[in-house]
Image (cartoon, rainbow, N blue to C red):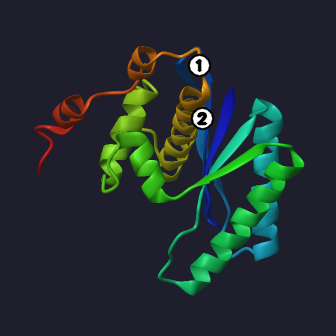
Amino acid sequence: MVILGIDPGTAIVGFGIVEYINKTFTVLDYGCIYTEKDMEMPKRLNIIYEELNNLIKKYKPEYIAIEDIFYFKNNKTVISVSQARGVILLCAEQNNLKISAYTPLQVKMGITGYGRSEKKQIQKMVQRILKLKEIPKPDDAADALAIAVTHINELNSKLSMYSNNISVKKIKNIPNKITASEFKNLFAGEKK
């Protein structure tokens, strides 16, 4: 299956496209869609729609996983991000993708198992899970990859809950998951 993860925004839309076959993650592409801040909003939204539509046509994902808007200090920002998110959802619907949304807390839990993880911890885990040589840049693209991985983990957990053919032992040994002590050791010695 192919998942398109999206970190929505108006100036920057992060995307990450991950294929998951036979318990193996493969990053197909990641990056950002950019729009100019002095451009009129309808033109910016059109760019987001067109670029996203091109990605969907190229990679043919089955699912789109998008970050949910949960809180913004600035009302103007939440309105513009909501508009961009609406365009993204419209594009997904028009391409018959299955749509799921995740809060930042759900993404943190889905990647590290800890809801107060810092951005650097999430990025390192995304790098490790996806077996990337370096942390993906920019941050919006790394966030989009984290959202895609969260969705894959969510699908796997639903599959394991409802399948009689999967034993508990197999569930515990899903590749790319680590124990709490392995996670702790990953960040040991990085304190500044």
| Residue 37 seen anywhere in this rendered image of the structure | no
- Image: 18 above or below 139: above
| Residue 43 seen anywhere in this rendered image of the structure | yes
State the separation of the CA atoms marked 1 and 2. Answer: 16 Å
**Residue 35, located in which quarter of the rendered image?**
bottom right
Query: Residue 149: which numbered mark, if any?
Result: none
**Neighbourhood count class around disc 2 (C-alpha, 10 Å): few under 14, some 14–19, many 20 upward:** few
Which residue is labeled 2 in the image? 155
Q: Circle 1 sits in a helix, a strand or a loop, which is it?
A: loop
Percent across and percent down for residue 78 are 60, 77
Percent across and percent down for residue 10 are 65, 67
Q: Amino acid at mark 1?
A: Asn
Comparing marks 1 and 2, which lies closer to the viewer? 1
Which residue is labeled 1 in the image? 164
Percent across and percent down for residue 109 are 40, 47
- For the N terminus, the image quarter is top right
